[in-house]
Structures are given as C-alpha cells and as structure tokens.
Amino acid sequence: MRVHAFLLLLFCFPHTTAQPQTLSFTLPSNYYEYLDVSVSQAQNLSFSVISNVSVSVYVFTSQAFSTFSQTGSAPSVFSKTGKDVKASVGPLQAGTYYFVVDNEGAHTARVSVWISEEPLSVYLLYHALPAPIGIADYGVDANAYTIKYTEVLGYAHIFSISAYNATPPTNVSKYGASLQLNTVLQVETVSGKSTYWLQNVVDFETNNQTLSYGDNVWNMSSSTSVFSKGALKGSGYISKFGNESVYIYATYFTSYNLPLYITLVTKTSYSAKSVNVQFGYFNGSQNPVWYDNVSLKEQGVVSAYMLVQDYNLTNRGTYYDAELVFGGEGNGEITNFTSLSANLALYYVTNNSVVAPPNLYGFGSDTLEAADDLMTQMQNGVPHVSIGSKSFAPLGALSTQISASSRVSFSSGKASVFVSAWGKPPFNYTIELNGKVVYQVTSFSEFINTSIPVKAGDSVNVFVDGTQLTNTSYTQSVNNTSVFSSGQTQSTTATTADLVIGGAVLLLIVVVTVATPIVLIRRRRSKSL
C-alpha cells in the first residue's frame, strides 16, 4: 500500500467469503434454512440469530444433517429454541457442519443471522507460494489473543539481497524488491469506528544497491478505500487508484551497503479531533528519523491504536495482523529473489512496555507484492528468510535473549565503533575509553555507528546491556586495526501483561479446508412419522 517513484503497494483482496456474514431472510411455517460451513481444526462456529417469532437453531455434522433432512430430527452438536439465540460452538473437529434455522411455528419468521468461524484461519488468503514472505502475527497460538499497541518496530539484518523479474509491472524495476512493515490502525470515535491500513516500506533497487523509504495509508472502513478532500495531511498526497484513493509518500533513493541493518518504526497518537501516524526508521541514532507525519482528521476520537486480533476481518476482508515481509517492489509485483539472507524481528510498544509476538507465521496476507521462492525458518528463536519454499507452518515465538557484536577500527587518532544488537529492545550501548564512559545511549535502534578521539596507548571497551564485547588498545605503530568480538547478555522474558487472552485455538495445519461461500437453501421441513 505505498507509492514510491510512482509505485503503489497493493493490499490483497480475499479469495473466499470465509469471513463473518450477516444474513436476513423470511421463513414460512414448517420451513427451514441451512448453510454448510467448512471449519478448520479447533475453530468455533459463532453465531447470533434474532427472529420475531421463536425458531429452532441447530448445528449438525454432515451425517446428522442428512438424517435431519430426511426425517426432521437428528442428534445435533448444538440445539436451542428462542427469538434471540447466541452461541459459540466448539472447539470443533475439522470438517463440514450444517447450520440450520427451523420455523416449527404457525407464523412466518423474519430472521437475521450473524455467523463466523472463530478464530479465523490464517490461510484464508495464502497457503503456498507465491506469497509475501517474512514474519506475521495473526493473533493466534495455543490461545487466540488481542494486542493493542501504539508503536511497532520491525528489525531486519540483511546479509544479501538481489531480485530479478524479466516482466515487471509498469513503473517497476526488473531488479526491485520491498520490505514492508504492515499494520492495522483502529480508531474509535463517539459515532463509531474507522479502520486504516498503514505501510512503512523500504524499496530496494538491488542491481545498484539503492533504497527508498515510503508509506501508504488506505481506508479499510469499507470495501473500497476512499478519502474525502482534506481527510488527512502529510508530506505526501492522495492519489486515485481505480475507484479508490490512497495516501502515498516516498523519499529519494540513497545507496546502501551490505550487511544492512534496518529498523522500521510506526507510531500512533491521537487527540479529540485527529489521529497522528508517524513513519520512521533508525539510522544508528538514539531517536528515529521520522520521514513522514500523517494527520487523519476524525471527530470525537476516544481512542486510537494498532491492533492484532484473529477474531475479525476488516470491512475490506483483510486481517487485523502485523507483518514484516519481503515481496515485489510495487504494483502487485511477484518477483524472484536470486539471493536473500536476512534475520527479522517484530516488537510492539504498549503502555510503555515492549511486547514480543507470542507466535509468528512465515508469511503475510494483506499485500499483493509477493515472492515466488522465499521461505522463513526459525533459527535459535530468530526468524531467518532465505531462498526456499517452507513458510506456512507456525514459527513459534521470538527469542527475547539479547545478543550483540561490535567492530572497532583505529585510524589517524580516531576509533570508529560499530555495534549491532539483536533481541528484545531497548538496547543499552556503552563505550569506555581507558575505563571511563565516553558514550552511552539507550535506544530501540539495532546499531550505533560512532567515533571517539584516541591517542597511543588508549584502551576502548564496548558494552551492550552491561556485557563487554570489545577490549582493544590503539598503538601508533599500527595505523589500521580491526577487532571483532561478540557476546550475549542474560536472557529476558517478554511481558504478557498487555495481552488479552481468550478462545483456545492453535492452527497447526499447512493445507487447510477453506469455508465455501455461504448459500442459504430453503427446504420444507419434513415431519417425522
């Protein structure tokens, strides 16, 4: 969802109607309506039935429904009669179930139904390559969970990256690729809710090692993204894309070197009349570089937060998830990565606490930019993306253990110090000169790159979170000396105090049965003899 140099990163439309449905119909006396729903392992079938007269609501297995349709009665998974019937049935075994509303009374029933499989399957949109590949949090592990957060950090250590597509879309480089931090913003006002999709993206031109930062904002409050004039303001502009409108902004391209250390950050805040979204990245400094600041005009705002939740889809039909994924450069491109080696991590900031995702998957779902030859595998708690095809089973949780490495080089009376860290932020960087602290910073940045003046005989020590990484001395006789050392701090544990837990489910399937489109079939009820 982001434009840079006339590129537009697109979000994915669902390929199925397997999402919450609202249905209304009339039901004459002695008639029933049914629909069949394919349910994944451990999902619940949740529904609400409201009628002007009392009706009977059933959930049958396939075999039981066959008996019911022939005789008018059969054992059911669920059965209740009333004018207002609400239930969540499950967790269920994988298979097809039949939801039935039966009017056994003397009067015509006017019926409204809301029904959904919960939690939603993570495989509604992608279950095989090509797909956006990296890491994604869908809000589901052994339990479904909800995380509300105001800041998100996407970390990437990229050791190699190159891509090639001989027939790219218009305005897309043959050598282009992207790394996308995609999140969903929920805004609550006195008059209702609004939903926006936020993209904080790095575009790569891998043939000349240049990159650009950019963002898109889409309105996900309905099936079509529309912004009225003056609805939002930032460094970019609102552009038309078919019958839709999207906010876009991008920086100029600049050169990069490998290995590349990237920390993307998206932050939200609000007042009664607007919601502010900041898009930025760290470049080794204590604070992020905010390259775009977008103000969304809303009246009567009571809260605004980014949201991970597996129980609902947006009105656009996309997930409330968080993604850090690789794909094509833009305009829905599916590209081939001729090389890629990268470590990824994702963290949320909520109530001034840093929260690690409880469970990750190796693929995203909301963007159309995709890769046809990448996979994500967990290596000692660190998600690693490389060439391959195994990305669709759950990855598990991130390791919160902090590790770090440093490099010190001396030249002409100066010590150049590079330190990179990995694990749960923030990171505490300290440099000592002859045992005295000369540089100290606490930051979410995954690296620092600084220099200090030195003279012959000076000793330079580097620490991350109190663990010493480097101890080396400068001598005049050696003009350039490089020292590399690495170490680890004590393991830390991500807090779960800000997680809202409920509804047990763990989707351990790679190939999943997706629910068929809901079609109501009216049948006269047969009386049992």
Image (cartoon, helix red, strand yellow):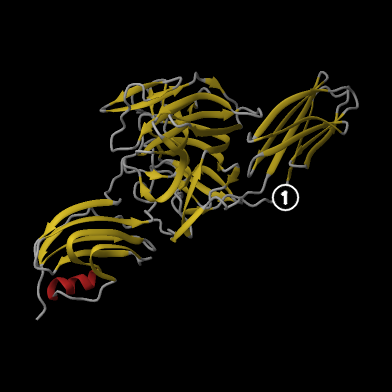
Q: Residue 305 in the image: x percent, y percent? A: 47, 39
| Residue 175 seen in the current view | no
The extreme right residue here reads 457
User: Which quarter of the figure is the N terminus placed in?
Assistant: top left
Left or right: 239 in relation to 284: left
When the figure is inspected, residue 228 is found, relative to residue 398, above or below; the finding is: above
Disc 1 is placed on an element classified as loop
The quarter holding residue 371 reads top left
Q: Residue 273 in the image: x percent, y percent? A: 43, 29
Q: Residue at x 38, y 25 (%)?
A: 247
| Nearer to me, 493 or 334 | 493
The quarter holding residue 193 reads top left
Circle 1 residues within 10 Å: few <14, some 14–19, many ≥20? few
Left or right: 148 in relation to 352: left
Q: Residue at x 43, y 49 (%)?
A: 309
Q: Hey, what amino acid is under mark 1?
A: Gln
Q: Residue 310 in the image: x percent, y percent? A: 41, 51
Left or right: 411 in relation to 269: right
The quarter holding residue 449 reads top right
| Nearer to me, 414 or 246 | 246
User: Which quarter of the figure is the C terminus placed in?
Assistant: bottom left
Q: Residue at x 32, y 21 (%)?
A: 229
Q: How many callouts does the rendering have?
A: 1
State the residue position of label 1: 490
Q: Residue 223 in the image: x percent, y percent? A: 28, 38
| Residue 262 seen in the current view | yes
Left or right: 357 in relation to 424: left
